[in-house]
Amino acid sequence: MIDPPTGAGSSLEDVRAASRPVVFPGQRTTSRRQLLSRRVRDHRRALLLGLLLLVAAWIVASGLLAVFGLLDASHGMTEVQAAKGRLSASDIVSQSALGPLRAARADFASSEGLLHSPLLTPFEVLPVMGRQLRSVQDLSTAAERTTQIGIRM
């Protein structure tokens, strides 16, 4: 039997075989489909990581807003207690209790602003946490209005 000629007149199968990459024993090959699926997987992973980081930053920022709002409300209560200590007849006439009341009003107004932040709005729909948040928001609003009325009188 005669071997087919090689060179310029080689068959189509020989050309296809020559254009394939050389694969050594034990070496894995990756197809275009595998490379594309790996890229998509990497993009999805990066997107998911970015989304998780964004949610984590939102939770941290919301927690800080709530903590600072509660601290301002606590400072306001301390100022109200100081104003209560100055409620004798002569202090009312001399209006010496107005300083602590004004400081308390400023603290309660700051607390109200922080606790009514749009960042905290999604927490209002949660069953337990939402109820607690709405209660603290209502209390800070009421305290701010009450101290404002106390200053006017």
Image (cartoon, rainbow, N blue to C red):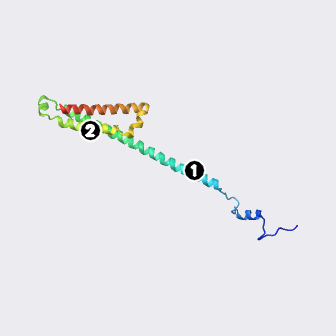
The label shown at residue 19 is none
User: Hey, which residue is sitting farthest right in the picture?
Assistant: 1
Specify whether 78 is left or right of 117.
left
- From the image, which quarter does the C terminus lie in? top left
Q: Amino acid at mark 2?
A: Asp
Asked whether the residues under the numbered discs 2 and 1 touch, taking CB atoms below 8 Å apart as contact, a structural biologist would say: no
Point 76% across, 63% down: residue: 12
Q: Quadrant of residue 77?
A: top left
Specify whether 72 is left or right of 34.
left
* Residue 80, image x, y percentages: 23, 33
- Mark 2, Cα crowd under 10 Å, few <14 / some 14-19 / many 20+, is many
User: Hey, which residue is sitting farthest top in the picture?
Assistant: 89
Point 39% across, 37% down: residue: 121
Specify whether 53 is left or right of 83.
right
Q: Nearer the viewer, residue 31 or 104?
A: 31
**Residue behind mark 2:** 107
Q: Quadrant of residue 133?
A: top left
Specify whether 94 is left or right of 68.
left
Of helix, strand and loop, which one carries label 1? helix
* Residue 106, image x, y percentages: 25, 39
* Residue 4, image x, y percentages: 83, 67
Earlier in the chain: of badge 2 and badge 1, it is 1
- From the image, which quarter does the N terminus lie in? bottom right
Q: Amino acid at mark 1?
A: Arg
In this rendering, is residue 4 above or below 141? Answer: below
Of helix, strand and loop, which one carries label 2? helix
Spatial CA distance of label 2 from label 1 is 50 Å
Q: Nearer the viewer, residue 1 or 86?
A: 1
- Mark 1, Cα crowd under 10 Å, few <14 / some 14-19 / many 20+, is few
**Residue behind mark 1:** 41
Point 23% across, 36% down: residue: 79
* Residue 118, image x, y percentages: 38, 39
